[in-house]
């Protein structure tokens, strides 16, 4: 990986021997199984790093994502790490581990729809058609601003409420990263049986999930960077990525190449993240 990472990625990084540290990961969702991919990557990085570190979940409930990140930035959070989408403000306020966790798949958005709205979404063929459907996205998520900047009709709400809004016909679809909706819809099949996943369109922009820490937490940052560096060098990151059930579902079920593709800009992407080499992004 040393031959792949640019100076921008490794700037300021110094690996030092570390004693055992606890890593508390803030999780917004009650069902921790939906975050198994991200949590497993943190476990992998800590296994590869020097030291005998532990990682555990710290539930933060249905809190606003922006507030959680602000708590982390100010040092008032009850956790050490949170994984979230990236924008310039988050990059400036927090220490960002510059490894796209889903290799850019989070910026490939498909829609969770209902039996009532699926035909309307399937009829979308042009960008003007896309602008005429209503799309849900989370309050405080960078995705919400990205979709709005493209001129799309966006309604924001708390994560769990967005599923209810689709089912209740208040929005036509809920935009999710392509690695997310299959487990989410399956988990709600009993209480929300009308939810399904659109198979016709995909909205694409440069974006992904990253790990954030408080800027003063240099020791944990360096441990994670050391671990991720080694995981890429020995191939274990790619082995994990290619074999995790959530990622395998993307390539087995989502049929990315068969969808009508709408590419939009990401005005929130920090230049340092845009400079991460192509080897760390899927399909580049």
Image: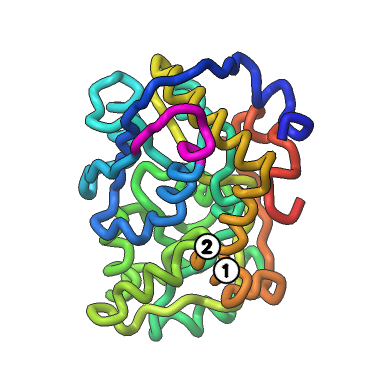
Residue at 50% of width from left, 31% of height from top? 224
Q: Residue 168: percent from the left, percent from the top?
A: 28, 75
Q: Looking at the picture, tell me which residue is in the foreground, 161 or 247.
A: 247
Residue at 58% of width from left, 73% of height from top? 254
Secondary element at tag 1: helix
> Is 218 left or right of 122, judged from the image as shown?
left
Can residue 47 be seen by looking at this rendering? yes
Up the image or down, 202 lies above or below 107; here it is below
Asked if the stretch drawn in magenta spans residue 75, the answer is no
Q: Looking at the picture, tell me which residue is in the foreground, 192 or 238.
A: 238
Q: Looking at the picture, tell me which residue is in the foreground, 49 or 203.
A: 49
Q: Looking at the picture, tell me which residue is in the foreground, 253 or 221.
A: 221
Can residue 145 be seen by looking at this rendering? no
Asked which quadrant contains residue 271, the reply is top right
How far apart marks 2 and 1 lie (CA) works out to: 6 Å
Asked which quadrant contains residue 31, the reply is bottom left
The crowding category of the residue bearing disc 1, from other C-alpha atoms within 10 Å (few below 14, some 14 to 19, many at least 20), is some
Asked if the stretch drawn in magenta spans residue 50, the answer is yes
Q: Are marks 2 and 1 in contact (CB under 8 Å)?
A: yes
Asked which quadrant contains residue 161, the reply is bottom left
Q: What quarter of the picture does the N terminus occupy?
A: top right
Q: Residue 107: percent from the left, percent from the top?
A: 58, 52
Residue at 69% of width from left, 53% of height from top? 282
- What is the magenta range? 45-54
The crowding category of the residue bearing disc 2, from other C-alpha atoms within 10 Å (few below 14, some 14 to 19, many at least 20), is some
> Is 13 left or right of 161, judged from the image as shown?
right
Up the image or down, 262 lies above or below 223; here it is below
Q: What is the image's colouring?
A: rainbow
Residue at numbered disc 1: 248
Q: Residue 63: percent from the left, percent from the top?
A: 24, 43
Residue at numbered disc 2: 244
Q: Residue 77: percent from the left, percent from the top?
A: 25, 28
């Amino acid at each position: 990986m040393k031959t792949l990472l640019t100076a921008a990625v490794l700037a300021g990084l110094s690996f030092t021997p570390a004693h055992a540290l606890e890593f508390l990961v803030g999780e917004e969702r009650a069902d921790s199984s939906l975050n198994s991919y991200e949590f497993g990557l943190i476990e992998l990085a800590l296994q590869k790093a020097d030291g005998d570190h532990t990682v555990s979940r710290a539930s933060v409930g249905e809190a606003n994502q922006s507030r959680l990140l602000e708590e982390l930035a100010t040092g008032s959070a009850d956790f050490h790490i949170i994984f979230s989408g990236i924008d310039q403000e988050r990059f400036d306020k927090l220490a960002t581990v510059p490894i796209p966790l889903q290799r850019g798949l989070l910026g490939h958005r498909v829609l969770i729809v209902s039996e009532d709205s699926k035909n309307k979404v399937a009829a979308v063929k042009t960008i003007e058609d896309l602008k005429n459907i209503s799309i849900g996205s989370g309050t405080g998520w960078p995705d919400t601003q990205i979709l709005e900047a493209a001129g799309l009709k966006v309604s924001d709400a708390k994560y769990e409420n967005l599923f209810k809004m689709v089912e209740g016909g208040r929005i036509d679809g809920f935009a999710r990263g392509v690695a997310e909706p299959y487990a989410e819809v399956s988990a709600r099949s009993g209480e929300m049986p009308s939810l399904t996943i659109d198979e016709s369109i995909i909205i694409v922009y440069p974006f992904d999930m990253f790990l954030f820490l408080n800027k003063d937490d240099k020791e944990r940052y360096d441990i994670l960077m050391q671990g991720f560096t080694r995981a890429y060098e020995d191939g274990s990151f790619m082995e994990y990525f290619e074999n995790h059930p959530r990622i395998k579902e993307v390539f087995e079920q989502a049929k990315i190449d068969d969808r009508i593709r709408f590419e939009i800009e990401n005005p929130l992407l920090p230049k340092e993240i845009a400079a991460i080499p192509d080897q760390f992004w899927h399909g580049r």
